[in-house]
């Protein structure tokens, strides 16, 4: 755990690096363009469809009527846009995560490698194509888990546990692979991800809770629709910065673990082979000549 906290503080310091701040705006620009393009073409249609869908349910209408009696009649006008924003949040987060993984994580790992692990050999155990399929496959599993767990979100404690746990698993899978793709071999990557699975999952869950911070801005954007064009890009940038921090955190932790793994393997001592007994006849004198025959003893009184 000490290595995890050491990597945490190093990552916080790296987030203040000008290169990290500059790179964090690249996914933001792409996400803003995508969000406004989708909003321009589909926002009115989506809000109208959601509003019409709510009108068909008496329970929803009873709830909105209760809000009006409580003096919250203005919420009826923003209820449908709020639902659209809430439904769009997981999609925005997933796309942001993939953009950070594709564009920022290699740059973050390279920055950590150059500044802290310059002597660590690069064995390229994971290609870009393999990393893409790995990220897409993990994202698909996370999306299915989110969809299947949505009914459980109605239980108050579980809504604070299940989504961060799923985001944490996805963050751990994506960023752990990307952190080791360049420097570790395939066997080293599998060994490290297996041996450090519990710590990596904790790091992913904590990163998931950090990623929940922009939800306050999303809620503000739903309550104050006029400020949504300003709040949504800010929230997206915070998401991006959180994921950039997560990529730095995983890079610091896993590259340090890789360095320790190789150092341990380098100092392993192989048991020496058992020594072969040497016969007296095979010993060669220092002069290189064959050993001389022993001189006969003079006959004694007991000899014939």
Image (cartoon, rainbow, N blue to C red):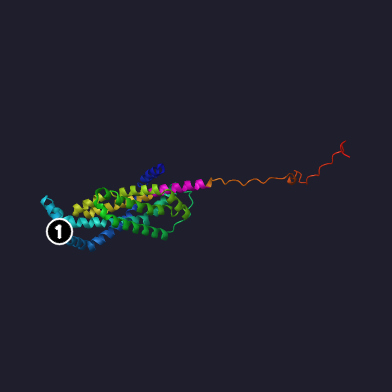
Q: Main secondary structure of the magenta part?
A: helix
In the rendered structure, does residue 44 fall within the stretch colored magenta? no
Closer to us: 262 or 293: 293
Rendered-image quadrant of the C terminus:
top right
Above/below status of 275 relative to 42: above
Residue 117 visible: no
**Residue stretch in magenta:** 249-265
Q: Quadrant of residue 303?
A: top right
Left or right of 193: which side holds 163?
left
Which residue is at the far top? 301
| Horizontal and vertical percent position of residue 253 | 41, 47
- Image coordinates of residue 165 in percent, x first then y, are 32, 50
Give the structural element (helix, strand or loop) at label 1.
Answer: helix
For the residue pair 268 and 301, the one nearer the viewer reads as 301
Q: Quadrant of the N terminus?
A: top left
Question: How many numbered marks, from 0 up?
Answer: 1
Q: Within the magenta stretch, is there residue 250?
A: yes
Are there few (<14), some (14-19), or many (20+) residues within 10 Å of tag 1?
Answer: few
Residue at image mark 1: 58
Image coordinates of residue 109 in percent, x first then y, are 41, 51
Residue 195 can be seen, yes or no: yes
Q: Which of 287 and 56 lies nearest the eye of the viewer?
A: 56
Percent position (x, y) of residue 202?
36, 47
Rendering quarter of residue 62: bottom left
């Amino acid at each position: 755990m000490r290595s995890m906290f050491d990597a945490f503080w190093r990552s916080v310091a790296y987030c203040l690096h000008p290169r990290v701040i500059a790179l964090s705006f690249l996914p933001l620009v792409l996400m803003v363009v995508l969000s406004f393009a989708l909003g321009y073409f589909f926002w009115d249609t989506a809000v109208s469809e959601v509003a019409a869908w709510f009108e068909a349910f008496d329970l929803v209408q009873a709830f909105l009527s209760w809000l009006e009696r409580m003096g919250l009649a203005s919420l009826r006008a923003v209820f449908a846009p709020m639902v659209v924003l809430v439904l769009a949040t997981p999609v925005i987060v997933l796309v942001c995560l993939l953009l950070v993984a594709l564009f920022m994580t290699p740059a973050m790992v390279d920055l950590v490698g150059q500044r802290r692990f310059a002597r660590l050999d690069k064995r390229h155990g994971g290609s870009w194509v393999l990393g893409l399929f790995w990220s897409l496959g993990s994202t698909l599993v996370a999306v299915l888990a989110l969809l299947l767990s949505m009914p459980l979100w109605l239980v108050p404690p579980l809504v604070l546990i299940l989504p961060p746990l799923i985001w944490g698993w996805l963050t751990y899978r994506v960023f752990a692979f990307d952190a080791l793709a360049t420097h570790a071999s395939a066997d080293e990557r599998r060994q490290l991800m297996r041996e450090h699975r519990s710590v990596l999952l904790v790091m992913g869950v904590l990163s998931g809770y950090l990623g929940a911070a922009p939800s306050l801005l999303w809620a503000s954007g739903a309550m104050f629709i006029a400020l949504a064009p300003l709040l949504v890009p800010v929230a997206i940038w915070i998401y991006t910065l959180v994921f950039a921090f997560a990529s730095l955190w995983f890079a610091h932790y896993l590259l340090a673990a890789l360095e320790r793994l190789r150092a341990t393997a380098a100092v392993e001592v192989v048991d020496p082979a058992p020594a072969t007994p040497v016969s007296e006849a095979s010993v060669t004198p220092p002069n290189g000549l064959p050993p001389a025959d022993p001189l006969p003893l003079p006959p004694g009184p007991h000899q014939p």
